[in-house]
Amino acid sequence: MRFSNTIGAAFAAVALFAATPAAKAALLSPQDEESSDESGEEGFGEDDGPETHYFAVRGADVYTGTGEVLRGATVLAKNGRIKAIGYDVEIPGLDFQADVPSKERGYTAEVLDAAGYRVYPGMVAIESSGLLGTGGDYRDSIDPFDQNMILGLSTGITSTGQSNAACKLKRYISQDPPVPYDFDGIVLRDDCYANFSWGSGSARRSVREKLVRASEYLREYRQWQIDVKNDKELKEPSKKGVDNSVLDVLQGNVLAKFRADSREDLLGIARIAQEFGFRPAIDGCREGWTVAAELGRAGAFAIVTPRERRDKSEMLVREGGSSIENAAILYAAGVQVAIKPASRGISLGGITGRDIMHLPVEVGFAIRGGLPEDAAIAAVTTVPARMMGVSHRVGTLEVGKDCDLIVTDGDLLHYQTFVQWTVIDGQVVYDKQDELYFAHIRPRAETEVAPLRRLDAGENEEAAEEGDSEADGDDDKDKQNGKDEEE
Amino acid sequence: MTLTTLLLAALPLTAAQPTTPDLLAIKVGKAETIDQGTLEHAVILIEDGKIVMIGEDLPIERGIPVLDRDPEWTVMPGLVNAYSRGPLDSRGGNDSTPGLRASGELYIGEDFYGDVLELGVTTLGLYPAGNGIPGRAVAIRTKADTAEGLILRDDAYLKIRMRSSGSDKKMLKKGFEDADGWIEKEAKAREKWEKEQEKAKKSKKGKKDDEKEEDKSVAVPVEPSLDDEESGDYVAPEKDPAAEAFLQLRAHELSALVAIGQSSDYLHLIDAIGAEEFDWDLRIPITTELDIFNVKREIGLRACRVVMEPQLSQHPNTLRLRNLPMELAESGAKLVLIPRDDSVVGHEAWLRNTGEMVGYGLDRDAALRALTLEPAELLKVADRLGSLTVGKDANMIFFEGDPLEPGTRVEAVMLEGEFVTGEVKL
C-alpha cells in the first residue's frame, strides 16, 4: 500500500492547508498538471487502489469502428473504460513492474493475448428481446445468468435496445473476492425514442396536430426568453396541450420512431420531418429504396432487415416491395442504416439463421446487396448507438468509451467466424472454450494463445495463477462432472 | 421426582410401549453424536428426558436400568425438518405480513405428527404459507397433548420470498422503511413526552414554591411518587407488526429465511438488502436445471445456511448430473436437508435420499449434520436438541445398521427421554 499511503499523506496536507486558499492552490497545481497530460502513456500508480482494474487485449488487429485498423495493437482499459489504443502501450502488471507483487502495485490487471485474432467494438443490436431475462423492469428483473444472454454474447452483442431502453448484456462473473453485481450499469438509457403511430389517417393527423402545437409553444417560449430580459414580470407561455415527448423530439433530445414500410408512409414521414425539422427513425422501411433520396434529405435513420422478401401490391404500377439492395440504396442516399434480423429474440426451434444470434449473417446480406463493408459494420455498432443516444459510451473503440469489445477469429461478417471472447466494461464475460455451446466447433488450440492471466491484488503471481483456475467457475464444474461420472 | 413419575404413569400409553424409566442407560454399538463425531460402544445416560452423560465404554452404576444393544444398534439424534408445512394447508397470500405466526395455525389430533415421529422426526419447523413475506415459523416437537404443548420455540425465523422482480425487492425494502418510520415516530413521541414532562415539572415547581410559603406551619409533605404517576411514564407508540419484525431483524432478535429460486434471485437479494445488516439463511428448492452453482462461491463465503432437498439436478441444457447440495457444502455453506416431498412418504424416503447424496459425493458428516444440528440451529433450538450432547433433550433414533444405508430399519425412536415407538425390552 505504498501508493495509498502517499495519497493519504497528500490529503492530510491538503486538509491542513485548506484554510488558506493560496496554499491549497499551490499544493494542487502539480497534480493538475499531471492529470492534464493523461494520454495513456504515463506510468501507473498515484490514483490506483486495490479496486483499480486494468484489462488489456494485445497483439490483435484492432478494428476501431472509426475507420481505422491497427494491426497487432493493444487496447488497454482501466476500470472498464478504454484508456489507450495503439502500439507501445504499457500494460500494468505485465510490462510494468512485473517483478513487483501486485500487493505493492495496488491494482489488478488482466491480459488477453490475442495475436492472430481481430478485435471489434461489441455489436449494438438495435432491438432484441429476452436477452436480459423475462421481466420488463430491467434493473430489478435482469437475470445475468440467462442462457439467452450468453448466446447474445456469443454472437458478439454487448448492448441492445429493449423497447425504449438501451441496455448492456452485463453477465455476472464470479470473482475472488466477489464483486457486487453492477445493477446500475445495465441500463444505459431508458428513454431512447418517442414512438409515433403512422398507421391510420387519424394517427397521422394526431401526429401533425401535436407537432403543430409543440412547435407553436417552442416559438412562444423562445420569444418569451428574449422578452423576459426587458420585462421581468412577463409570464411564461402556457404548456397546455403540449405533448412532452413531441417537445423532446423537436428539441432533439430523443428520436421520433415510426413503424412504416410503404412508399406513401415513408414519403409522409420524410416530409413531416423536414417540415418540422426533426430526424425520424423508421423501423421497417421496406420500400425505402424507392424514396431513398427523400429519406436522405430528411436525415432519416432506417432499421432494415435485408433478407426480408415481400412482393409489392399488384394493384400498383409503381416500384415497390422489398429489395436486397434496400440498405445499400438508402446508405448511398445518406440515410443512416441499422440492421436487425427477422426475429428479435433467440429462437432454438425451426430454421436457424433468422434470429438475433445471426445478426452478422443478416448484415452479410446487406453487403450482398451492395452495402460497403464499413457501413455494414456501422449498421450493427455505431448507427444503433447513435440512434439510441448512447454513442458516447458504446459503438466504437475510442479512448474514454466503455471497453465493450469482441475478439473474433476472422472477419466479423464471415459466416465461418466465431466470437472467441466478449468483453464488457473491461471484463471477459464470454469465452467460447468455456461455454457449452460452440466450444467443440473448431476449438481453439491450447497452444495458440496463452491462457488468460489474472494478477490479483494481494497475491503473488504464483498464488494468483492458482487462484485463477479456481476463479474460473467452469473448471470446478468440469471437475465435478468428472467425479459424477466416475461414481 | 416421584411426582414426575406419577404424572408420567398417569399419561395414557399405548399397550405396546412399556413406560420408559426416568433414569436409563443405553449401550449401543455406534453413536453419531454430530458434534463430537462417531462414538463406538457408546453409553448414554438419560435422566428426566435429558442426556446427562455420553461416552465410549462408560461404566454403568449398579441399579441403573440398562438397555444393552451393543453392537447391533446405531443411534443418532432425532431428525429435524426445519422447513415443513406438516399437516397444515398451503393456502397463503402474496403480501407482506411479517407479524403472522405459523404457531397460530397449530392444532392437535392430526395423524401426521405421530406418523413422522415414528420415522424418527422429533422436531419440525413449520413455516407460514404464502409468497411475499408470509410470517414467522415455529419449531415444534412432534408429540404433545395440546397445541401449545407442541411449541418448542416461536419466531424460529421470518420467511421471505425473493425473486428477480421489482415487487419482491420493494417489499423487503419497504419492511425496513416501515422500521425507520416507526423509529422516527417513536423519537417524535418521546420528544413530545419529554417536553410535556418539562412543562409539568416547571408548573409543579411553581406550585411547590407557593405551597412552601403558605403551608410552612402545616408541613404536610406532598408525596412525590403520586405526582409522578399523575404525569405518567413514557409509553412508546404501538409498533405495527410489520415494523416490529424488521426492527427485530435489525436487532438480530429474529433471523430471516429467504426463499430464492435461481442465481439471479441471489444477486437481487443482495441488491435489495443494500446496507441493511441482519441474519439470513437461504431456502433454495432443487429444480431440474437449477443454476445456483453460478453463485456458490458467494453463498459459501457468507457461510449462511442453505435449505435444500437431497436431490441431484442437471447442468442446464445438458443431461450432466450435478450434486448441488454437495457443491454448496464444499463452498462453505451450511447445509440443511429437508425431505424431497413434504408428506409422510417424503419423510420416509428422507434418510434414504440423503444416503444417495452421500453416494454421489456429499460428505457423510455434513449430511448427518444437515438432518439434525444444522436445522436445529436454523430453528434456534440447538441449545436443547440437534445433537447427542450432555444437557440436551434425549431425542434419538435407533437403527439396526447404518442410518444412511437403504433398507436400514428404525428400531426405536425416543422423544425427550421416552420411547415413542418400537418394542423395547430392557
Image (cartoon, rainbow, N blue to C red):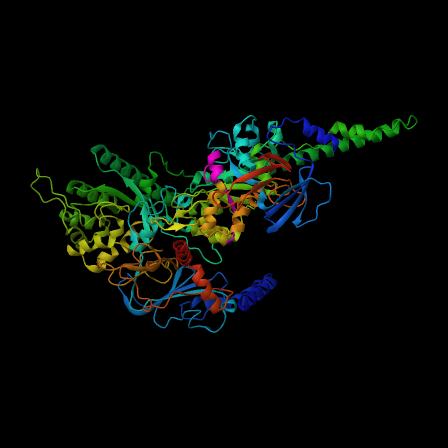
Q: Is residue A90 above or below residue A133?
A: below
Residue A22: x, y in percent?
A: 56, 65
Looking at the image, can residue A252 be seen?
A: no
Which residue appears farthest toward the left when viewing the image?
A317
> In this rendering, would A136 be left or right of A441?
right
Q: Which residue is painted at 28% across and 45% down in the image?
A: A345
Q: Is residue B346 magenta?
A: yes
Return the residue nearer the eye: A235 or A144.
Answer: A144
Q: Is residue B99 above or below residue A98?
A: above
> In this rendering, would A302 be left or right of B418?
left
Residue B386: x, y in percent?
A: 59, 43
* Quadrant showing the C terminus of chain A: bottom left
Residue A219: x, y in percent?
A: 31, 42
The magenta segment is B331-349
Q: Is residue A461 magenta?
A: no
Q: Which residue is painted at 17% across and 49% down in the image?
A: A307
Return the residue nearer the eye: B322 or A19.
Answer: B322
Return the residue nearer the eye: B46 or A274.
Answer: B46
